[in-house]
Image (cartoon, grey):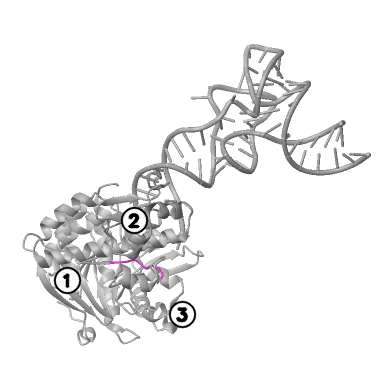
RNA sequence: GUGGCUGUAGCUCAGUUGGUUAGAGCAUCAGAUUGUGGUUCUGAGGGUCGUGGGUUCGAAACCCAUUAGCCACC
């Protein structure tokens, strides 16, 4: 095992397992960062540019009860830029969010957003989606950028191939991502946070839908003795059962005493299925982006609030919901706001959906601790996919 | 009152010298969305072409009348 002494001397993120389910691989744990604790399994709201769209921090804390949020290196690097972030004292201070933050490395965005990208061994050249300006991301530059942003958990720079990638492409891509990972850890060991708090670098398991590549990747990433591990490149076009199988392959190999983060996933059902298979952390744009477009997730199923059938329904948005928006506002009113294009519709739906996602993972945690996760999960999966 | 212009989907408008089942954008109604470009896709419904007559094998288009709106002049 390769060691990185500069970092092992520092205070590291703690991960304390509290309970492992007897009938599945589900676990409950507590992570401790310099910006506070995170109780897992956890869902992390996505705040790409340093803001969870439409949700005030006050509501994020009190209504959604978010414990950690995401930022995105690609977006923050382009806007407001590193100079402003450094001058502000990092993203925590800049955005007045004094709880944990995780930043994605920008690997995914370089492929999903930027144009004219050119992959080389060195890194990725791309044009900004904002003004077309040309930039280069390398494993080293992405670590440096995440140092300046200052998130508690930072991610390795990887390539995320599509779910339909051929085996040859997947293997070639994974090999380059692995070489990039070594450079990420080297740069990580040479640098430290400018703001004094600890930052943990998570490597990302890749390998598309090929079990042997996934297994090799999961073995490979462990040499860095990281404080947590991510599973990337899933929910990118492959069928859900394939995704579940890949999670099983990865989690059979990844260390049990470290958090496992399934990137970009997913639907409420995806999340429960992944928790059952031993995943601890999730992020997804679905509750916020789909919420802005009228999709509401509830414990009884899914609502498309734009549907005409809600026009004259003045019952609460979600009588079982945990946020004040759930009972203060009616379905008919929220439909009206959404159809009218009012920003309040996006705010209400985002708060509702995020509060629901956080409620869901908290319930999962409580049932893991109580020892009846499996039976609870089976009942929930039955309900969560229904269309109301 | 006279002359001119314009009436085509809920709205704004295309529509070739007359030629199959009259189109688009927006809106409406549905569906999709998985490490966020406050999006973006996909599909559906919706028109007696202002009204009435005429010419023609065939009219949204040409002719006549009529009606509504706008403009100009008395």
| First along the sequence among labels 3 and 1 | 3
In the rendered image, the vertical position of residue A267 relative to residue B59, given as above or below: below
In the rendered image, the vertical position of residue A40 relative to residue A326, given as above or below: below
- For disc 2, the marked residue is A316
Protein chain holding label 1: A
Are circles 1 and 2 on residues that touch, CB within 8 Å?
Answer: no
One can see residue A103 in this view: no
Q: Is residue A231 or residue A151 the one in the foreground?
A: A151
Tag in front: 1 or 2: 2
CA–CA distance between discs 2 and 3? 43 Å
Q: Residues within 10 Å of mark 2 (few under 14, many from 20)?
A: some
- For disc 3, the marked residue is A84
Quarter occupied by the N terminus of chain A: bottom left
| Extreme residue toward the front, this view | A314
A277 left or right, relative to A323: left
Percent across and percent down for residue A138 are 36, 71
Whether discs 3 and 1 lie on one chain: the answer is: yes
In the rendered image, the vertical position of residue A82 relative to residue A179, given as above or below: below
| First along the sequence among labels 1 and 2 | 1
Percent across and percent down for residue B44 are 43, 34
Q: What's the magenta region?
A: A44-49
Q: Is residue A122 or residue B21 the one in the foreground?
A: B21
Q: Is residue A278 or residue A345 the one in the foreground?
A: A345
- For disc 1, the marked residue is A222
């Amino acid at each position: 095992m390769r060691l990185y002494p500069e970092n092992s001397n520092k205070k590291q993120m703690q991960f304390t397992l509290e309970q492992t389910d007897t009938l599945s691989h589900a676990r409950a744990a507590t992570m401790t960062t310099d910006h506070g604790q995170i109780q897992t399994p956890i869902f992390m709201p996505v705040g790409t540019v340093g803001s969870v769209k439409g949700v005030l921090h006050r509501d994020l804390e009190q209504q959604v009860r978010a414990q950690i949020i995401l930022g995105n290196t690609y977006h923050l690097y382009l806007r407001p830029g590193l100079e402003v972030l450094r001058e502000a004292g990092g993203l925590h201070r800049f955005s007045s969010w004094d709880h944990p933050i995780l930043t994605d490395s920008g690997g995914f965005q370089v492929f999903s957003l930027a144009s004219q990208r050119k992959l080389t061994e060195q890194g990725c050249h791309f044009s900004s989606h904002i003004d077309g300006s040309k930039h280069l991301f390398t494993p080293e530059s992405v670590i440096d950028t995440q140092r300046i942003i200052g998130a508690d958990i930072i991610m390795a720079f990887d390539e995320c191939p599509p779910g339909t990638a051929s085996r040859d492409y997947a293997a070639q891509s994974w090999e380059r991502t692995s070489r990039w990972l070594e450079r990420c850890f080297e740069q990580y060991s040479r640098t430290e946070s400018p703001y004094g708090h600890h930052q943990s670098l998570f490597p990302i398991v890749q390998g598309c839908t090929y079990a042997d590549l996934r297994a090799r990747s999961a073995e490979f990433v462990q040499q860095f003795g990281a404080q947590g591990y991510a599973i990337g490149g899933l929910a990118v076009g492959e069928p859900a059962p394939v995704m579940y199988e890949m999670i099983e392959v990865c989690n059979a190999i990844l260390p049990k005493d470290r958090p496992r983060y399934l990137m970009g996933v997913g639907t409420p059902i995806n999340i429960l299925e992944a928790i059952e298979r031993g995943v601890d952390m999730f992020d997804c744009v679905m509750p916020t982006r789909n919420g802005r477009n009228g999709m509401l997730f509830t414990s009884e199923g899914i609502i498309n609030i734009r549907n005409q059938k809600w026009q004259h329904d003045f019952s609460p948005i979600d009588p079982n919901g945990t946020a004040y928006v759930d009972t203060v506002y009616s379905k008919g009113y929220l439909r009206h706001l959404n159809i009218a294009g009012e920003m309040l519709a996006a705010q209400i739906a985002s708060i509702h959906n995020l509060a629901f996602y956080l409620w869901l993972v908290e319930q999962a945690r409580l049932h893991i601790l109580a020892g009846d996760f499996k039976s609870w999960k089976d009942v929930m999966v039955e309900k969560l996919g229904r269309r109301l």
